[in-house]
């Protein structure tokens, strides 16, 4: 049985295997692909919608309990690699 986590972007619950763990390393957000980096992690769906929603709402800072702002360049690069979901 896979553990369940809550996405900081859309607030929906999903299996851990379908989500991306994000950690703060030296004041920057880093995608933890293998979910093995030390420290507190925040979970988000690996989709353009959830990542941008989490960044827009500043959810990572709250979830990671980090005061102040975090550098988001690493996640911004990841967002540009994910194709946006389009209807039609």
Image (cartoon, rainbow, N blue to C red):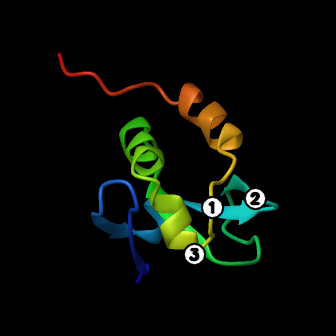
Q: Are marks 3 and 2 in contact (CB under 8 Å)?
A: no
Give the side of residue 65 with respect to residue 17, left or right. Answer: right
Depicted 51 relative to depicted 39: above or below:
above
Chain-order first, disc 2 or disc 1: 2
Residue at 62% across, 69% down: 67
Q: Farthest residue toward the left?
A: 88
Q: Secondary structure at mark 1?
A: loop
Crowd around label 3: few <14 · some 14–19 · many ≥20 (10 Å)? few
Crowd around label 1: few <14 · some 14–19 · many ≥20 (10 Å)? few
Q: Secondary structure at mark 3?
A: loop
Give the side of residue 14 with respect to residue 24, left or right. Answer: left
Q: Secondary structure at mark 2?
A: loop
Residue at 43% across, 78% down: 2
Give the side of residue 17 with respect to residue 25, left or right. Answer: left
Residue 77, horizontal then vertical, whole percent: 65, 32
Report how far apart the C-alphas of labels 2 and 1 lie in the structure: 9 Å
Residue 70, horizontal then vertical, whole percent: 66, 53
Chain-order first, disc 3 or disc 2: 2
Q: Farthest residue toward the right?
A: 26
Residue 45, horizontal then vertical, whole percent: 43, 53
Q: Which residue is mark 2?
A: 27
Report how far apart the C-alphas of labels 3 and 2 lie in the structure: 12 Å
Residue at 49% across, 69% down: 62
**Quadrant holding the C terminus:** top left
Q: Which residue is mark 3?
A: 65
Report how far apart the C-alphas of labels 3 and 1 lie in the structure: 10 Å
**Quadrant holding the N terminus:** bottom left
Q: Which residue is mark 1?
A: 68
The reply to whether residue 5 is in sight is: yes
Residue at 43% across, 51% down: 54
Q: Report the mark closest to the observer, 2 or 1.
A: 1
């Amino acid at each position: 049985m896979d553990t369940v986590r809550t996405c900081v972007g859309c607030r929906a619950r999903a299996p851990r295997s379908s989500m991306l763990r994000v950690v703060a390393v030296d004041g920057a957000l880093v995608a933890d692909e293998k979910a093995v980096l030390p420290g507190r992690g925040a979970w988000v769906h690996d989709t353009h919608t959830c990542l941008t929603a989490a960044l827009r709402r500043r959810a990572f800072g709250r979830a990671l309990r980090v005061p102040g702002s975090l550098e988001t360049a690493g996640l911004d690069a990841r967002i540009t690699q994910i194709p946006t979901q389009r209807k039609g």
